[in-house]
Image (cartoon, grey):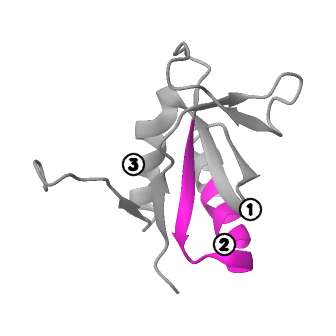
Amino acid sequence: MQLSIVHRLPQSYRWSAGFAGSRVEPIPQNGPLSDNNLVGLKLLSPDGEKAWPVMHKLSQALTDIEVACSVLECDGEPCLFVNCQDEYAATCRLKNFGVAIAEPFSGNNPF
């Protein structure tokens, strides 16, 4: 079994009008934040075609604890989208499921 590594996409998303659950669009950086904003998680490893079944397993792990999520293509890769308010529950579940979460860090605060 290969270790799965995900990271949070830098921007926030929302459901495209009329496509809730099947298509997302980025929210402009100066756009309003709401409870309906989505967080995208992208798989760093594995990638390519091998990423799709892994993302569906991760999606099932979240569904098992009743966290609503969708696996959708974003920039040619499968991404897992969850509501912003569910981000911490989702990442906690994924960590407990054996997934590594790549966290951003800066030179000023490396750890």
Q: Earlier in the sequence, mark 2 or mark 3?
A: 2
- Viewport quadrant of the C terminus: bottom left
In this rendering, position of residue 49 left or right of residue 12:
right
- Viewer-proximal residue among 44 and 54: 44
Give the image location of residue 10, x and y in percent: 47, 43
Q: Is residue 19 magenta?
A: no
Please identify, in this view, whether the residue under mark 2 or under mark 3 is nearer the observer.
2
- Viewer-proximal residue among 40 and 3: 40
| x 52%, y 37%: residue | 11
The span from disc 2 to disc 1 (Cα, nearest Å) is: 11 Å
Q: Residues within 10 Å of mark 2 (few under 14, many from 20)?
A: some
Indicate the amino acid at tag 3.
Cys
Mark 1 residue element: loop
Q: Residues within 10 Å of mark 1 (few under 14, many from 20)?
A: few
Give the image location of residue 7, x and y in percent: 45, 56
Indicate the amino acid at tag 1.
Gly
The span from disc 1 to disc 3 (Cα, nearest Å) is: 26 Å
Identify the residue under disc 1: 76
In this rendering, position of residue 11 left or right of residue 58:
left
Q: Is residue 49 magenta?
A: yes
Q: Earlier in the sequence, mark 1 or mark 3?
A: 1
Identify the residue under disc 2: 51
Identify the residue under disc 3: 92
The magenta region covers 39-59
Using the image, determine if residue 65 lies above or below residue 7.
above
Q: Residue 40 occupies which quadrant of the picture?
A: top right
| x 50%, y 18%: residue | 30
Using the image, determine if residue 67 lies above or below residue 52.
above
| x 47%, y 37%: residue | 87
Please identify, in this view, whether the residue under mark 1 or under mark 3 is nearer the observer.
1
Give the image location of residue 98, x and y in percent: 42, 68
Indicate the amino acid at tag 2.
Ala
